[in-house]
Amino acid sequence: MFEADDIRKWRDHDVVDSAGRKIGALESIYVDTATDKPAFATVTVGIPTRRRLVFVPLEGSKVGPGYLKVTYPKNLVRDAPSIGTDDVLPATEEEAVFKHYELSYQPGTGGERRLARP
């Protein structure tokens, strides 16, 4: 797995699902604020005039020559919570990202955000 600092090298590479089907292009990485480890990627999807960024967990993902393979199917990822290409994930929407993938969500002990862009 790559580190969040290496994202500049991987930006715009293909993101594919477990069956090798292209989902979109890697845009950025969100780290888990509790561990400072990469937790989710944002993937650019949609037609050129209607692009958006969807979130996909990085757990179990692998990198290959020119691509990032995630463990979730393309249809599930494309239906994930999304933001505009120039937007950031609002704190109030973090829980929905986790729930979409049936992952448990627990904000920080002081109620702080769980995901952040490095």
Image (cartoon, rainbow, N blue to C red):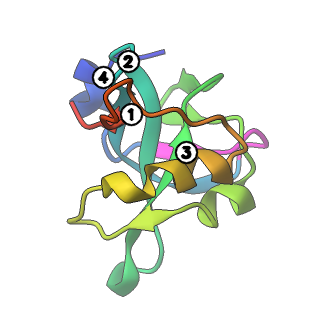
Q: Which residue is mark 1?
A: 114
Tag 1 near tag 2, CB within 8 Å? yes
Which residue is denoted by mark 4 in the rendering?
Answer: 4
User: Mark 2 against mark 3, which lies toward the viewer?
Assistant: 2
Give the residue at x 71% y 35%. Answer: 71
What secondary structure is marked by label 2?
loop
Image side of residue 35 versus residue 58, left or right: left
Name which residue type carries label 1.
Arg
Mark 4 vs 1: CB contact within 8 A: no
Which quadrant of the structure image shows residue 113?
top left
For mark 4, does the 10 Å Cα neighbourhood hold few (<14), some (14 to 19), or many (20 or more) residues? some
Q: Which residues are magenta?
A: 14-20
Q: CA distance from mark 4 to mark 2?
A: 14 Å
Which amino acid type is marked by label 2? Answer: Ala
Mark positioned earlier in the residue sequence (2 or 3): 2
**Residue position for label 3:** 56
